[in-house]
Image (spheres, rainbow, N blue to C red):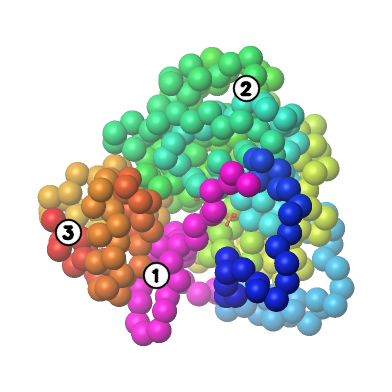
């Protein structure tokens, strides 16, 4: 990657002012990338499996057509997703990853200075997306066991609040919200305030108390579901995410979306992934990762760790001041993890060998 931070000495620096909200943005920190030599990349919650042969051939076939623009409305993909979710096509909006879809959701509803309530620590794209959309972030701390504090989030809603972001399972801590507490939040939030349910890790959830997003959306038209093919479906590199919303809201989100935001290759790969046989195979892989999550969690408990209950493809260590040092030890041992300085560290569930390598690192942290 080119180094974009070092000043170019051959041309003068610009004095064009950046928007104050943009100048103040924290940089999005991607998970560490592998250097030379054997490293296990457990830093970005990626799916460790490479694409299915059927998905790979859809990609290869689509590659020969990239001189053409993609289908602007991703008609076939939207149809496939609508069938998959069980809603009408007018309720689905796709985008260049669900991070982009979230940006479009916020741009569709926020005016300058409108408040957006979201948990913290949570997905690091949230403060950026809110600021870029001109909103004002109102953060509500997660509980010591990494759960969203929904009563406190409801209490943080004011007359200026336009949206509430609910990340379930919460990235990076792992717990899900429960259907009952979500219902209480939705009852407390005015009906003209948007509630975004970010379900990026939906397929990894095994908690019977987790809400059924579609059922929630049917009863609460101010809810928007955010989903992605980056995690369970293993297409992080192709960037396909989507929102499911009531048709009028969906049209508003679509109206602000980047034109041609999902590439032709990505559309075809996503459609191939949703084909029944492919989907069955992909969800078997998710089952295997969920089994690995249980194995890793049990082993960590045996080591003496008391961790939040994760329903995603990662685990969270609230290491506080030890975070940076522990992350450095992991890197030295060939395991890339994701530190959040001074707070804690997230470790993705990967292939068995990667998880074993990480368990040895975690034992040394004790
Ligand atoms: C990974 C993730 C996403 C999905 O990102 P994409 O842009 O679809 O790759 C969305 N929300 C959360 C909380 C995530 O962790």
The residue nearer to you, when weighing 201 against 165, is 165
Disc 1 and disc 3 in contact, CB within 8 angstroms? no
Q: Main secondary structure of the magenta part?
A: loop
Tell me which corner region of the image, top left, top right, bottom left or bottom right, holds residue 362. bottom left
Membership of 37 in magenta stretch: yes
Q: Which residue is mark 1?
A: 41
The local secondary structure at tag 3 comes to helix
Sooner in the amino-acid sequence: mark 2 or mark 3: 2
Q: Which residue is mark 3?
A: 365
Sooner in the amino-acid sequence: mark 1 or mark 3: 1
Sooner in the amino-acid sequence: mark 2 or mark 1: 1
In the image, the residue with mark 3 has its CB under 8 Å from the nearest atom of ligand 1: no
Q: Position of residue 333 (x, y in %)?
A: 25, 73
Which residue is the extreme one toward the right? 68
Looking at the rendered image, the quarter that the N terminus falls into is: bottom right
Badge 1: how crowded within 10 Å, few (<14), some, or many (20+)? Answer: many
Q: Residue at x 29, y 36 (%)?
A: 145
Number of marks in the image?
3
Looking at the rendered image, the quarter that the C terminus falls into is: bottom left
Q: Residue at x 35, y 51 (%)?
A: 341
Q: Which residue is mark 2?
A: 161
Q: Which residues are magenta?
A: 23-52
């Amino acid at each position: 990657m080119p180094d974009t931070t070092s000043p170019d000495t051959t041309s003068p620096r610009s004095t064009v002012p950046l928007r104050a909200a943009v100048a103040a943005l924290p940089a999005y920190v991607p998970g560490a990338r592998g250097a030379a030599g054997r490293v296990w990349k457990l830093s970005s919650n990626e799916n460790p499996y490479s694409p299915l042969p059927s998905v790979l051939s859809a990609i290869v076939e689509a590659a020969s057509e990239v001189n053409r623009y993609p289908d602007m409305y991703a008609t076939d993909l939207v149809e496939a997703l609508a069938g998959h979710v069980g809603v009408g096509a007018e309720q689905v909006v796709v985008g260049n990853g669900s991070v982009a879809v979230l940006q479009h959701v916020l741009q569709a509803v926020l005016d300058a200075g409108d408040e957006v309530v979201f948990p913290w620590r949570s997905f690091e794209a949230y403060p950026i997306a809110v600021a870029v959309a001109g909103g004002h972030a109102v953060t509500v701390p997660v509980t010591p066991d990494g759960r969203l504090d929904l009563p406190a989030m409801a209490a943080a809603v004011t007359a200026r609040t336009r949206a509430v972001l609910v990340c379930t399972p919460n990235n990076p801590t792992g717990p899900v919200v429960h259907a009952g507490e979500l219902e209480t939040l939705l009852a407390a939030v005015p009906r003209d305030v948007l509630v975004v349910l970010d379900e990026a890790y939906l397929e990894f959830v095994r908690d019977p108390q987790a809400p059924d997003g579609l059922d929630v959306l049917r009863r609460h038209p101010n809810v928007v579901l955010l989903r992605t093919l980056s995690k369970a479906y293993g297409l992080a590199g192709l960037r396909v995410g989507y929102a499911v919303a009531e048709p009028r809201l969906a049209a508003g989100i679509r109206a602000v979306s980047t034109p041609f935001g999902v590439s032709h290759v990505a559309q075809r790969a996503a459609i191939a992934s949703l084909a029944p046989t492919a989907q069955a195979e992909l969800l078997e892989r998710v089952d295997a990762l969920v089994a690995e999550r249980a194995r890793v969690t049990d082993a960590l408990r045996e080591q003496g760790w008391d961790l939040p209950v994760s329903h995603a493809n990662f685990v969270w260590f609230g290491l506080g001041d030890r975070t940076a040092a522990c992350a450095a030890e992991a890197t030295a041992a060939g395991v890339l993890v994701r530190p959040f300085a001074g707070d804690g560290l997230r470790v993705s569930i990967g292939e068995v060998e990667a998880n074993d390598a990480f368990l040895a690192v975690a034992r040394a942290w004790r």
